[in-house]
Amino acid sequence: MRFTDKLLSASRKNKSWLCIGLDPDPELMPVIDVLEFNKAIIESTSDLVCAYKPNLAFYEAMGTDGLAILEKTLKQVPTHIPVIGDAKRGDIGNTAKAYARALFSVLGFDAATVSPYLGFDSVQPFISYEDKAVFILCRTSNKGAMDFQGLLTDGSPLYEIVAQKAKQWNIHGNIGLVVGATYPGELQRVRSICPDMPLLIPGIGAQGGDLASAVAGGADARGEKAIINVSRQILYASKGRDFAEAAKKMAEKIRDQINGYLGR
Amino acid sequence: MRFTDKLLSASRKNKSWLCIGLDPDPELMPVIDVLEFNKAIIESTSDLVCAYKPNLAFYEAMGTDGLAILEKTLKQVPTHIPVIGDAKRGDIGNTAKAYARALFSVLGFDAATVSPYLGFDSVQPFISYEDKAVFILCRTSNKGAMDFQGLLTDGSPLYEIVAQKAKQWNIHGNIGLVVGATYPGELQRVRSICPDMPLLIPGIGAQGGDLASAVAGGADARGEKAIINVSRQILYASKGRDFAEAAKKMAEKIRDQINGYLGR
C-alpha cells in the first residue's frame, strides 16, 4: 500500500491528525527501560493517532543497543499505523542509496525525513521507493531556522524555493514537506505552493507553536494531510507511574482539539 | 587533545593530507566480512593518512550489526590518527544534542560532519564539544549540489553565505567545512573566506575531481589543513585477495601526488 493511502486510512479510522514523536529521552522518562516506555505509550495511544514518528537521534545516543530497541519498538506499532523515521538524512547519490536502504528496507519505516541541502540526487534514492514517502525539510520549527531558510533569492525565501523544487521533484507522488508550526503564516504559504502534499508539522507544545493556526494553515482543501506531531507534551505528560494513562489523556485532548479546529 | 592539533600531528608524522573514507559497500568489497575488510585497509594504510572517515550510511545499511562493526572498526585505528564520522546530521537543539552525544561520546569520533540547513542551534550542540571538530557541509561534490547551494542572495551563492556564517559561529575554533573537489574555483573562493579552517575535500577519484586543483585551492597559506578524502579509488583498487596491498599502493601514490602538488 502506498504511504498516502495508509496515512489517510489510519487517520480516518482513528479520526485523528495527531502524530506522536517517539523520542525517549533518558533525562525525562519516568521509567528506565526504553522499550517498556515506548510499548506502554504505543498501547495507550494507537487508537488516537494517524502516525508515529521516532527520531533516530534518541536511539543512536543509546549506543549499539539503541537500534535494536528501535527495531523492537517498530514491531509494537499496529501494522495499519504508518511510522515516519525522523532521520533528516542527506548525502550524495551512492550514500543516500545506503541511507534509504537502512531506513526503508532494514528498519522498515513507511516514510523518512530528509534534508534538501544536497539537492535532487540526494533525495532521488529515497523517492524511488514508490510505496514509501519522503518528507523534505522545508521550514523548520527551531530558532536558527531562518539563518539560511529565510535568505531571499529573487524575493523568495529559500524555504519557498525548497517547496517549489519538491513539487517539481514529485514525479512518483510520494514527497511531503516538514514545516514547523511556529510560524503559521509561512506554513500557510507552503500549503498554497503545495496544495496536495502531506505536511509533517512539528513545533506544537514544548516548542511553542499554536495548534489552531497549525491546523488552519496546514490542512489541505479537504481538511486532511496535516500531520501534527507532538512529542514531549504527550510522552512526559506525567513523570509518575501513570505516564501511559496521562499520555493517553493528553493525546485524546490534542486529537479532539485538532478535530475541533477542523470543524469535526 | 584538540582536533586540529591531532590532525596536524598525524599529518606531519605521516607526511600526508590523504584521508581514507571507510565506506564498505557489499556490492564492491572483495571479501564478505566487513570488519576484516576495514581492518586490512587500516593496517595497510595507517602510516599514509592524516585521518579516516567512515560514512555512517554504509554501516546503518547493514542493520543492527552495522553499528557494532563500526565500533570495532574504530578500535582498529591507531589512537594518534583522527577519525571523522561522516554523518551529515542536522536537527533542532535537543535532538542535535542527542546526535552529538551519539557521535562524540558513544562512538567516540574526533570530528563529525553536519548539515547547515537548520541554522546555528543545530550546530551549537556539536561545537560545544570543544576538543572535537565539526565539519559543516558548504559546497558538496555531487551533481545536484547547486539546486540550492548555488542560489544567489545579494549576489552571493548560498554556499558562500554558509562559509561566512561558519566563520562567525567559530567561537570555539573547532569548525571546519566540507567543500567538494569537483569545483576548484569554488573551493578556492571558500578558502579565501575561511583562510584558517580545516577543509574536508571529497570528490577526488570516482567522483571526478582533479587532485592538483583540489590541493592548490584547498591548502591554507602553510600548505596545510586540506584533508583530501578518497574512498572507492583506494578501497576497491583491486577486487582480488590483494585488495589491502593494492589499497596501500594507491594510497601511497595519491599521498605522494598531493605532496608533489604541495612542493614537498
Image (cartoon, coloured by chain):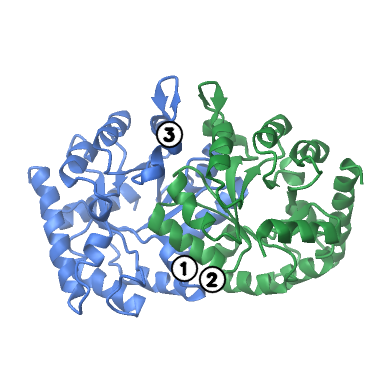
Chain colours: A blue, B green
SS at mark 1 in the image: loop
Q: Name the chain under label 3.
A: A
Q: Name the chain under label 2.
A: B
Look at mark 1 in the image and give the residue it sits on: A61
Q: Image height check: is A250 above or below A112? A: below
Q: Residues within 10 Å of mark 2 (few under 14, many from 20)?
A: some
SS at mark 2 in the image: helix
Q: Name the chain under label 1.
A: A
Does the CB distance between marks 2 and 1 fall below 8 Å? yes
**Residue A173 versus residue A116: which sits nearer the camera?**
A116
Mark 2 and mark 1 on one chain:
no
Q: Residue at x 30, y 49 (%)?
A: A202
Mark 3 and mark 2 on one chain:
no
Does the CB distance between marks 3 and 2 fall below 8 Å? no
Alpha carbons under labels 2 and 1: distance apart: 7 Å
Look at mark 3 in the image and give the residue it sits on: A162
**Mark 2 belongs to which amino acid?**
Val
Does the CB distance between marks 1 and 3 fall below 8 Å? no
Q: Quadrant of the N terminus of chain B?
A: bottom right
Q: Residues within 10 Å of mark 1 (few under 14, many from 20)?
A: many
Which of the numbered marks, if any, corresponds to residue A191?
A: none
Pinpoint residue A76: horizontal percent, then vertical percent.
31, 72
Q: Residue at x 75, y 55 (%)?
A: B19
Look at mark 2 in the image and give the residue it sits on: B106
Q: Residue at x 76, y 36 (%)?
A: B217
**Mark 3 belongs to which amino acid?**
Val
Pinpoint residue B168: horizontal percent, then vertical percent.
54, 40
Q: Residues within 10 Å of mark 3 (few under 14, many from 20)?
A: many
**Of tags 3 and 2, which is closer to the observer?**
2
